[in-house]
Amino acid sequence: MSPRAASPLKDDRSTKRSKTATPTPQDMLPDKIAEIVSGGDGILVLNGMAAAPATSIGLRVSTHALSLASPVFGDEIARHKPPQPNADATTSETIISLPGEDADAMLLLCHILHLQNDKLPTRIAPSLLLRLGALARKYECVVAAGRATVYWFDNLYFADDPGNIWEIIEAAYLWDEAIFFARFTSMWVLRQLMNSKGIAAATTIETQKLAWVLSERLGTVQSDVRNEIDNLIETCAFTFSKGASHYIDYAAGLSPTTSETPSGKSTHCVVDAEGAKDYLGAIRDAGIWPSTCWSWFDEGADKHITVGELVEKIKVFREPPYDDCDRCAGCFYVKENFTEELERVQEKHAKRLWGQCLDCYKAGGTEQGECRYQHAK
Ligand SMILES: [Zn+2]
Ligand SMILES: [Zn+2]
C-alpha cells in the first residue's frame, strides 16, 4: 500500500483537504490512468495490477454509471464528491482510493458497468472470474454485471482444459449463474474417482457449505451408480438361484411325475441361464462390472475409473444378441428383464443432473417453483 493511498476512502474530511496541509486529492493521483470512459468525472485509484504491481493505476470512470449499477459505489461516490460550486478546488473529479481492491478484477468490472464490452478479453482464467464475482458481490452489482460473464463461462465449459473446475463453480455461485453452475458441478462430479471421496476446498466463506453439499452429492451419485449396476446384474444372477431353477415347461420348485416322463429323464431348462451368462460376460468385457475392474495397474501406477468414465461405458453398452426362442412356460424371461433394466438405467442417466441445481441448492433442498436449469426433480 502506498502511503498516499492510505485510508481516504474512510475519511469524510478528504474532500476538504485542498484547504489544509494534509494530502490533496491531487496527491492521491495514480502513476497511470486507464480511460474506462474518456471525460469521466471520477477516478478510482488502485494499487498495481498483476502485470505491473509497483505502478498504481487510476481508472477514469463515470460516477453516474457506477452509481446506477452499484449502490455501494453510489455511497462511496456521494461521500467523495467535491463540494459544488468549488472555485478553490484543485480538481472537480471525484477521486476514490481503493488500495485494498483487486486492480485486475476492478478494471474488468468497470468495463462491464460502462458497457464497454468490446474491451473485455475473450477468455479469462477461473481464478479471475472468481475474484471478479467476489468483487461484484461486494459492490452489489451482480445483476447489473452478470450477463457479461456468460461467454467466459461458456468458453471455459467448451475448453479442452478449463482449469480449476471448483473455482469456476464458486464463481458461478457468486455470479448466481444457474446454467453454468449446474454444468460445472456436473463436470466436477463426473471427473471424480468412482472409489474415493472427492472433497472440494472452498476458497471463500460463502462457498464452504457448497463444498460440503457437493461432496455429499458425489457420494449419492457413486452409490446410485453402484446400485443401478447391481440391479442390472441381479436380472442375470437370479437365473442361477434355486428359486429360478426349473424343468422345461415346469414352474420352479415343481418336477415332472414319472407318468409325464416315462423315460425317467427330466430336463432342466437352461434358456435363462445361458442368456444370463452372455450378458454377465458382456458387462465384464465392457469394464462395467464387477467393481474390481474399476482399478488397474498401468505404467507403474494404480489407475482408477472416474464416475464419468463408468457412466460413459454404461451409455455405450449394447447388449449382446441372444435368441431366447426356446424359452419355456417356466422361464423368467432374462432377456426381457435385462433389456428393460438396461434401458431404464441408460434413460435415467441421459436425463440425470449429475451435479447440483443452484435454485434447489439455494432453497436448501428441492426448489418448489421452476428452476432456471431444467432438470428432473
Ligand atoms: Zn425355461
Ligand atoms: Zn432445481
Image (tube, rainbow, N blue to C red):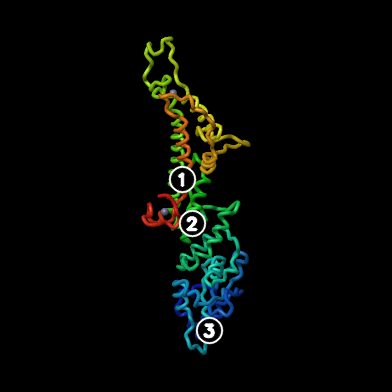
The image quarter containing residue 239 is top left
Q: Determine the residue positioned at 47% across, 31% down.
A: 335
Which quadrant of the figure contains the N terminus?
Answer: bottom right
Mark 3 or mark 2: name the one nearer the start of the chain: 3
Q: Determine the residue positioned at 50% across, 77% down.
A: 63
The vertical placement of 190 against 81, above or below, is above
Alpha carbon separation for disc pair 1 and 2: 19 Å
Q: Which residue is mark 2?
A: 179
Alpha carbon separation for disc pair 3 and 1: 56 Å
Q: Nearer the viewer, residue 140 or 251?
A: 251
The image quarter containing residue 230 is top left
Q: Which residue is mark 3?
A: 92
Residue 309 percent across, percent down from the top left: 54, 42
Mark 1 C-beta to ligand 2 under 8 Å: no
Judge the density around disc 2: few (<14), some (14-19), many (≥20) Cα neighbours within 10 Å.
some
Residue 176 percent across, percent down from the top left: 46, 60
Judge the density around disc 1: few (<14), some (14-19), many (≥20) Cα neighbours within 10 Å.
many
Q: Which residue is mark 1?
A: 218
Q: Nearer the viewer, residue 43 or 148?
A: 148
Q: Secondary structure at mark 2?
A: helix
